[in-house]
Image (cartoon, grey):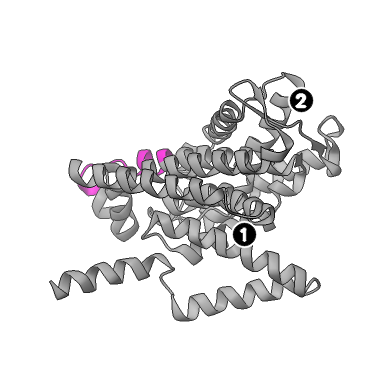
């Protein structure tokens, strides 16, 4: 177990370092696209964490918007502008938002869990739209973040935000992989397969699912913080059901077998959306739908299953 954990950490650090170096060569539009895909990938990673326990959240927009609004208010009204501190604050606020609901939601499965999380997200959307102090339906802009107390120069702002997003995504990906392979992470898989048997063996399924929900909320808030810092604007649509649907889209596209696949799927979504909206501005949603149908048809277990099948094939060949 320690050997596997060490290998996971080393591979994650090397991969993150390569992406940071590659970022210096990318054009500005691709830097922004990759930054957003890293931020959204963190949110989707939280959904994958819950999927391993057999539930799917259709309300991650709740914590995504909650973390984003918290970060924007901290920056504009409290003067907290450090990007790393804001990311942690966004995750912490989102986790605190989810904590009161977690024990209740942990008792539900299937469509009931999905609809309850969607309802919570839409309640927040309604509150944000009606709250003039938060900009109402138009939202409000956020001041540019700093890094370690230093103002980020305009020429380097895109790369610095990219580097922050990639570094945080890499760190959370490593921690998620370690968590998946831990006892609690393996119990989540057991709950997915046979919850009743897990309960008979003495494990508390409610505690495991509660912890998964709160951890996923932290990831959602951290992803929301990074996205808002990159965009410079926050609005109620970040809590709308279509936003949550995009995160579920990425989770289905990735599958629950690989952490890396989540970020690959998030990048593919941003790429397809960017080009389809540019070349098919009136029908880009249809292009995304066709893309998802193709993936479901030929990769029903998600992109991550390719890595799993390759490892099984290599093991069989050895």
Residue 308 image position (x, y, % from top left):
30, 66
Q: Give the residue at x 59% y 64%.
A: 269
Q: Nearer the viewer, residue 19 or 254?
A: 19
Q: Do the CB atoms of the residues marked 2 and 1 lie less than 8 Å apart?
A: no
Camera-near label (2 vs 1) is 2
Crowd rating for badge 2 (residues with CA inside 10 Å; few <14, some 14–19, many 20+): some
Name the outermost residue toward the left. 318
Q: Which residue is mark 2?
A: 76
Residue 116 located left or right of residue 49: right
Residue 188 image position (x, y, % from top left):
33, 50
- Locate the C terminus by quadrant: bottom left
Q: Give the residue at x 42% y 50%.
A: 49
Q: Give the residue at x 59% y 44%.
A: 162
Q: Which residue is mark 1?
A: 246
- Residue 75: image quadrant is top right
Residue 157 image position (x, y, % from top left):
68, 38
- Residue 175: image quadrant is top left
246, above or below 21, in the image: below
3D distance between C-alphas at marks 2 and 1: 28 Å
- Residue 81: image quadrant is top right
Q: Which numbered disc, 2 or 1, marks the residue that appears first in the sequence?
A: 2
Q: Nearer the viewer, residue 115 or 314?
A: 314
Residue 247 located left or right of residue 303: right
Quick check: can you spot residue 104? no
**Residue interval drawn in magenta:** 199-211
As helix, strand or loop, the secondary structure at mark 1 comes to: helix
Count the marks: how many? 2
Residue 70 located left or right of residue 138: left
As helix, strand or loop, the secondary structure at mark 2 comes to: helix
């Amino acid at each position: 177990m320690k050997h596997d954990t060490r290998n996971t950490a080393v591979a994650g650090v090397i991969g993150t370092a390569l992406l940071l170096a590659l970022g210096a060569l990318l054009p500005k539009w691709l830097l922004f696209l990759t930054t957003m895909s890293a931020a959204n990938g963190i949110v989707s990673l939280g959904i994958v964490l819950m999927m391993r326990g057999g539930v799917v959240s259709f309300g991650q927009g709740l914590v995504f918007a909650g973390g984003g609004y918290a970060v924007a208010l901290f920056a504009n009204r409290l003067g907290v502008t450090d990007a790393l501190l804001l990311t942690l604050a966004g995750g912490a606020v989102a986790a605190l938002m989810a904590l009161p609901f977690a024990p209740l939601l942990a008792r539900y499965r299937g469509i009931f869990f999905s609809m309850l999380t969607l309802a919570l997200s839409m309640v927040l959307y309604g509150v944000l739209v009606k709250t003039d102090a938060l900009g109402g339906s138009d939202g409000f802009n956020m001041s540019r973040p700093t890094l370690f107390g230093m103002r980020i120069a305009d020429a380097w702002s895109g790369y610095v935000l990219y580097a922050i997003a990639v570094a945080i995504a890499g760190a959370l990906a490593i921690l998620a992989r370690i968590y998946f392979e831990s006892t609690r992470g393996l119990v989540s898989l057991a709950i997915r397969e046979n919850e009743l048997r897990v309960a008979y063996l003495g494990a508390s399924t409610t505690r495991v699912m509660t912890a998964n929900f709160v951890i996923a909320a932290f990831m959602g808030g951290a992803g929301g913080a990074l996205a808002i810092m990159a965009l410079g604007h926050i609005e109620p649509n970040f809590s709308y059901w279509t936003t949550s649907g995009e995160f579920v889209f990425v989770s289905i596209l990735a599958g629950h077998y690989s952490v890396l696949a989540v970020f690959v799927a998030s990048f593919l979504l941003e790429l397809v959306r960017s080009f389809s909206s540019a070349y098919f501005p009136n029908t880009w949603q249809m292009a995304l739908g066709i893309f998802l149908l193709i993936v479901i048809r030929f990769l029903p277990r998600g992109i991550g299953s390719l890595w799993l099948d390759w490892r099984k094939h290599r093991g069989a060949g050895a």
